[in-house]
């Protein structure tokens, strides 16, 4: 690896207060000095003379020169797993800036003071110009991102759809040729909030379940956040409704596995609905759009005026969100997937849902007696399963243990991707035929 050209990857600068800043670099082009200059842009209040990275035992190794930086890159590439290399998108290399010890510049209380002539009012004109030049030189505009994806590194291929909060594109990451789905959400928020969103989204890197969509990275460009995830060629389940019961069992198994996996690591989805369950022609079923970033959820909610018809009665009434609320949304989703309709009589005409005021929809969710799945069309097991997810009293809904022992789930043999694959491919054939005629 030492003599070959090393591909671009992300250096994650971990600041003292544990805030991460990602910076995409080409190892052959970036220098030690440039790295220190980037620190100055990210942490203008401190002076740095070196930085550290961790070896496989967690021991810190200091970098003070181009030579040592080269050693660090070689070490990083030698430690990559075959899986990382095959994925094309490399994990970030975390570095820890080291502050220079300049006692004459510190006061006795240990408070940092300005060291480089920068006044309290902010940088001088000359500093601003240097900053701007540096920004262009080292690609600082890319720092507000996690992962190594930026707008420029993507080739947008096709608009896949749009929801309440934004648009989703199919795009290709030029360096890795990786096809991905990019969800763009416009948000009118401060840079501080943008940073918080990016750092909250990073938890998605740790989610490793075959039932959860893979996360490739996220970045802000102007006022838009772009979230890049695995592309699923079958799209979301809303396009398949009504879904025959044969497939519903398999879909439920996958959604539950994904949900239970996330619950285990203390993450709630917060927005379960047919639009957030994706399928592909390989027969995979995956959950997407996890509400892992509280700040992102808040920022979207403040611009969205509608009412989510998948919300549980207790959530509509402002009570704390918990697993039972998630189970309710799953119940509404299954009901809709099975019948193509919502479990509320008065919300079933689309024209009504769009003309009803948000508070009227909330009233329906709280007050209306839910429809029951008709027993003549569905098995007794499915009807009972859905009805028990849709119990008005949260404590009486199915919970983690009951799910797996419920006859509807027990009747499922193990997951068979060929079934879902059949569903996706036959739909793709139908839409191709209708496009041709
Ligand atoms: N990873 C993906 N792969 C393939 N298609 C996708 C992917 N993510 C989303 N889509 C498609 O894009 C459409 C719009 O997605 P989006 O997440 O914006 O919709 P939504 O969930 O209805 O909206 P919102 O979450 O804003 O309420 C989806 O219905 C789906 O068909």
Image (cartoon, rainbow, N blue to C red):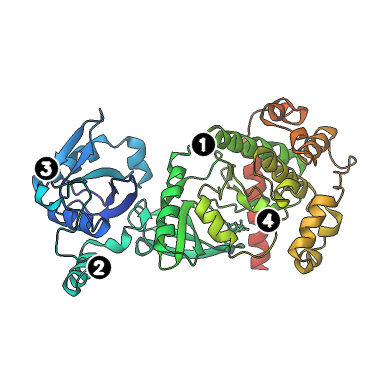
- Please rate how many residues cluster around mark 3, counting C-alpha atoms within 10 Å: few if below 14, some from 14 to 19, many from 20: some
Q: Indicate which disc, 2 or 3, sits on the residue closer to the N terminus.
A: 3
Residue at mark 3 to residue at mark 4: CA–CA distance? 54 Å
The disc at residue 239 is 4
Residue 407 % position (x, y): 77, 27
Residue at mark 1 to residue at mark 2: CA–CA distance? 46 Å
Q: Which one is in front in this view, the residue at disc 1 or the one at disc 3?
A: 3
In the image, 378 versus 212, the foreground residue is: 212
User: Which residue is outermost to the right?
Assistant: 376
Residue beneath disc 2 = 122
| Residue 348 vertical placement versus 126 (above, below) | above
The disc at residue 68 is 3
Residue at mark 1 to residue at mark 3: CA–CA distance? 37 Å
Residue beneath disc 1 = 209
Q: Which one is in front in this view, the residue at disc 1 or the one at disc 4?
A: 1
Q: Quadrant of ligand 1?
A: bottom right
Q: Is residue 30 visible?
A: no
Q: Is label 3 in a helix, a strand or a loop?
A: helix
Q: Indicate which disc, 1 or 4, sits on the residue closer to the N terminus.
A: 1
Relative to 194, 1 lies left or right: left
Q: Indicate which disc, 1 or 2, sits on the residue closer to the N terminus.
A: 2
Relative to 195, 7 lies left or right: left
Q: Is label 2 in a helix, a strand or a loop?
A: loop
- Please rate how many residues cluster around mark 1, counting C-alpha atoms within 10 Å: few if below 14, some from 14 to 19, many from 20: some
Please identify the quarter of the rendering in which residue 123 is found: bottom left
Relative to 281, 152 lies left or right: left
Residue at mark 4 to residue at mark 2: CA–CA distance? 53 Å
Q: Ligand 1 closer than 8 Å to the CB at disc 4?
A: yes
Q: Indicate which disc, 4 or 2, sits on the residue closer to the N terminus.
A: 2
Quarter in which the N terminus is drawn? top left
């Amino acid at each position: 690896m030492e003599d070959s050209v090393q591909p671009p990857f992300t250096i994650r600068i971990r600041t003292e207060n544990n805030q991460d800043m990602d910076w995409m670099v080409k190892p052959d082009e970036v220098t030690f000095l440039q790295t220190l200059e980037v620190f100055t842009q990210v942490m203008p209040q401190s002076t740095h003379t070196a930085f550290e990275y961790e070896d496989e035992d967690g021991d810190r190794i200091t970098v003070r020169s181009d030579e040592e930086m080269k050693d660090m890159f070689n070490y990083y590439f030698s430690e990559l797993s075959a899986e990382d290399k095959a994925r094309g998108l490399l994990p970030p290399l975390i570095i820890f800036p080291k502050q220079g010890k300049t006692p004459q510049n510190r006061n006795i209380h240990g408070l940092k003071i300005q060291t480089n002539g920068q006044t309290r009012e902010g940088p001088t004109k000359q500093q601003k110009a240097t900053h701007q030049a540096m920004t262009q030189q080292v690609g600082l505009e890319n720092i507000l991102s996690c992962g190594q994806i930026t707008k420029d590194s993507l080739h947008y291929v096709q608009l896949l759809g749009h929801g309440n909060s934004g648009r989703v594109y199919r795009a290709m990451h030029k360096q890795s040729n990786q096809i991905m789905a990019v969800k763009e959400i416009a948000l009118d928020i401060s840079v501080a909030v943008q940073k918080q969103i990016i750092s909250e989204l990073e938890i998605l890197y740790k989610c490793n379940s075959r039932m959860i969509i893979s996360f490739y990275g996220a970045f802000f460009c102007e006022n838009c956040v772009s979230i890049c995830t695995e592309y699923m060629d079958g799209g979301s389940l809303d396009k398949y409704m009504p879904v025959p019961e044969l497939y519903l069992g398999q879909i439920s198994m996958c959604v539950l596995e994904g949900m239970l996996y996330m619950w285990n690591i203390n993450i709630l989805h917060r927005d379960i609905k047919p639009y957030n369950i994706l399928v592909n022609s390989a027969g995979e079923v995956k959950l997407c759009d996890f509400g892992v970033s509280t700040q992102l959820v808040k920022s979207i909610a403040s611009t969205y005026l509608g009412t989510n018809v998948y919300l549980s009665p207790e959530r509509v009434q402002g009570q704390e969100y918990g697993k039972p609320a998630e189970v309710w949304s799953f119940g509404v989703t299954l009901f809709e997937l099975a019948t193509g309709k919502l479990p509320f009589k008065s919300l079933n005409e689309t024209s009504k849902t769009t003309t009803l005021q948000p508070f009227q929809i909330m009233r329906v969710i709280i007050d209306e007696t839910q429809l029951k799945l008709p027993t003549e069309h569905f098995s007794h097991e499915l009807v009972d399963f859905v009805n028990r997810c849709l119990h008005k009293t949260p404590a009486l809904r199915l919970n983690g243990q009951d799910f797996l022992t419920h006859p509807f789930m027990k009747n499922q043999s193990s997951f068979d991707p060929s079934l879902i694959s059949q569903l996706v491919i036959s739909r793709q054939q139908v839409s191709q035929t209708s496009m041709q005629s």
